[in-house]
Image (cartoon, grey):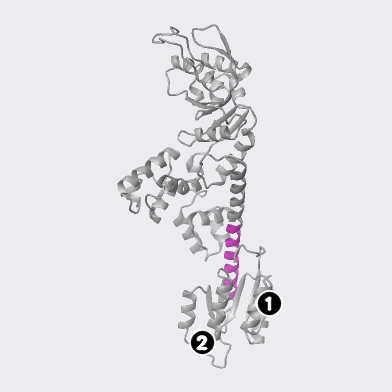
């Protein structure tokens, strides 16, 4: 089977025909185009050769008996080849004047059929296309296996905290996050709103040396500026209007664990000064108190703002920026990791309904300006309105959304199919017309579930 012991590239063709002259002619024709060929004079000999060495393609005669119109032995050979190598492309050669049986075998999985005497150009084009598609299958299988191996290694080493993903971008990000999790250093997580920055912070904490300690989160953008310091550092009674009793701040609550500061760019300058001190010394005072308190806290922060631009504008301290940004984890927008869309959608559905193929295409085509949060809301709404039935594009409510931008980096499923058709199935040509590398097109074939 493809991906099971086949070398790549595999430009080796097995010819099975009981006419020596035909075998010699085909071997010569293929060798002139740098394609290795081996011949067998009978079905039994051909099947034996297939077991001994790998081939990328079979060209088989359909007439091995005295009765040149029955094709019974040829049909039996075809089915035996399919049983042994289901993904191996087979070209049928026939001298029949009636081709109904050959057409039936094409419907049963034969890649092509050619009448004798064949047209050299047509045969070569078919062979080249099928070898190219075979290599595409092997490349997709290799990429899939490599991704599975990396994911398995990640799951063995780290607590994934239930994170669901399918993209190489997320896999690479989590590999980096896992590597730095054990080091007690500040980490800055950047990315757009709704992309899942807090989930990445929770992953870092769960794989850190303080994972047994508390994980405390504070959204600095959800509080008035005059309350953020009290939330961070706590307050004594009477420290401000309404402070009737002493209050423990987030730093004290996170002592021995991790404090996650979301939307750190919203922290006022006065709060930035105090935060810098805690990061450097572990010391702070509650509002309204002169007593210095000592904590040991791993600080993770996140922002969707451009902190470098804020530093230049004077609204964010440069020394605090470099203190927080010892390690940066850049979380891409969902639109930049579309391989995560369908796994996340299935996760949010939790088996309550099934996505129609057209709904899958709509999910992949949408821009997702609200990122994972928007996707979750869309799926929850569709599952509710669908009542457990099949989810269609109409239930997703995306039909009035602006279409995804047409660009060469992210062609739609229809664009990929059209490019393959226009290129006669030749992956390298289709990739070139789409402005992609062959590997990039292989990844999209896998993502869209397209069998070349």
Q: Which mark is residue 182?
A: none
Dot label at residue 96: 2
The residue labelled by disc 1 is 38
Q: Are marks 1 and 2 in contact (CB under 8 Å)?
A: no
In the image, residue 66 sits, relative to residue 304, either above or below, namely: below
Task: Pick out the residue farthest to the front.
Answer: 212
Residue at the spot x=58%, y=51% of the render?
148
Within-10-Å neighbours for mark 1: few <14, some 14–19, many 20+: some
Name the residue: 66% across, 66% down.
10
**Which image quarter: residue 209?**
top right
Q: Secondary structure at mark 2?
A: loop
Question: Is residue 140 shown in magenta?
Answer: yes
Q: Is residue 31 in the magenta section?
A: no
Residue 161 appears in the figure: yes
Q: Which residues are magenta?
A: 123-141
In percent of width and height, residue 236 lies at 47, 9
In the rendered image, is residue 437 in sight?
Answer: no
State the separation of the CA atoms marked 1 and 2.
Answer: 24 Å
In this view, the residue farthest toward the bottom is 66
Front in this rendered view, residue 84 or 62:
84
Q: Position of residue 59 (x, y in %)?
A: 60, 77
Observer-nearest residue: 175 or 225? 175
- Seen in the image, is 419 located left or right of residue 385? right
Report the quarter where the N terminus lies: bottom right
Left/right placement of residue 241 relative to residue 273 reads left
Closer to us: mark 1 or mark 2? 1
């Amino acid at each position: 089977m493809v991906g099971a012991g086949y070398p790549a590239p595999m430009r080796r063709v097995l010819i099975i025909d009981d006419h020596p002259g035909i075998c010699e002619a085909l071997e010569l024709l293929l060798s002139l185009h740098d394609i290795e060929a081996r011949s067998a004079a009978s079905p039994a000999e051909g099947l034996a050769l297939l077991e001994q060495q790998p081939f990328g393609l079979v060209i088989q005669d359909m007439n091995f008996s005295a009765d040149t119109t029955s094709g019974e032995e040829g049909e039996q050979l075809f089915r035996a080849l399919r049983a042994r190598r289901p993904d191996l492309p087979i070209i049928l050669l026939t001298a029949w004047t009636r081709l109904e049986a050959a057409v039936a075998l094409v419907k049963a999985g034969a890649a092509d059929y050619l009448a004798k005497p064949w047209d050299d150009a047509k045969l070569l084009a078919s062979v080249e296309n099928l070898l190219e598609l075979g290599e595409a299958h092997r490349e997709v299988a290799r990429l899939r296996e490599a991704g599975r191996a990396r994911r398995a290694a990640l799951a063995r080493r780290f607590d994934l905290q239930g994170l669901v993903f399918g993209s190489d971008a997320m896999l690479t990000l989590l590999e980096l996050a896992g590597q730095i999790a054990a080091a007690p250093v500040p980490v800055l997580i950047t990315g757009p709103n709704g992309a899942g920055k807090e989930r990445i912070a929770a992953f870092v904490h769960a794989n850190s040396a303080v994972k047994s300690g508390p994980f405390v989160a504070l959204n600095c953008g959800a509080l008035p500026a005059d309350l953020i310091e009290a939330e961070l550092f706590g307050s004594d009674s009477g420290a401000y209007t309404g402070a009737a009793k002493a209050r423990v701040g987030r730093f004290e609550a996170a002592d021995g664990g991790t404090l996650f500061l979301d939307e750190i760019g919203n922290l006022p300058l006065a709060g930035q000064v105090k935060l810098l001190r805690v990061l450097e010394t572990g010391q702070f005072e509650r509002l309204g108190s002169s007593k210095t308190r000592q904590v040991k806290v791993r600080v993770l922060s996140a922002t969707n703002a451009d902190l470098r631009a804020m530093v230049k504008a004077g609204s964010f301290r440069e020394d605090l920026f470099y203190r927080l940004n010892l390690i940066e984890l850049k979380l891409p927008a969902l639109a930049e990791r579309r391989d995560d869309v369908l796994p996340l959608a299935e996760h949010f559905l939790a088996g309550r309904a099934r996505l129609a193929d057209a709904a899958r295409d709509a999910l992949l085509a949408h821009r997702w300006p609200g990122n994972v949060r928007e996707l979750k809301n869309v799926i929850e709404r569709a599952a509710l309105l669908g009542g457990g039935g099949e989810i269609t594009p109409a239930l997703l409510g995306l039909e009035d959304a602006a279409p995804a931008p047409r660009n060469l980096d992210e062609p739609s499923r229809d664009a990929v199919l059209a490019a393959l058709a226009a290129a006669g199935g030749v992956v390298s040509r289709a990739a070139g017309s789409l402005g992609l590398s062959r590997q990039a097109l292989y990844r999209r074939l896998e993502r869209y579930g397209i069998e070349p």
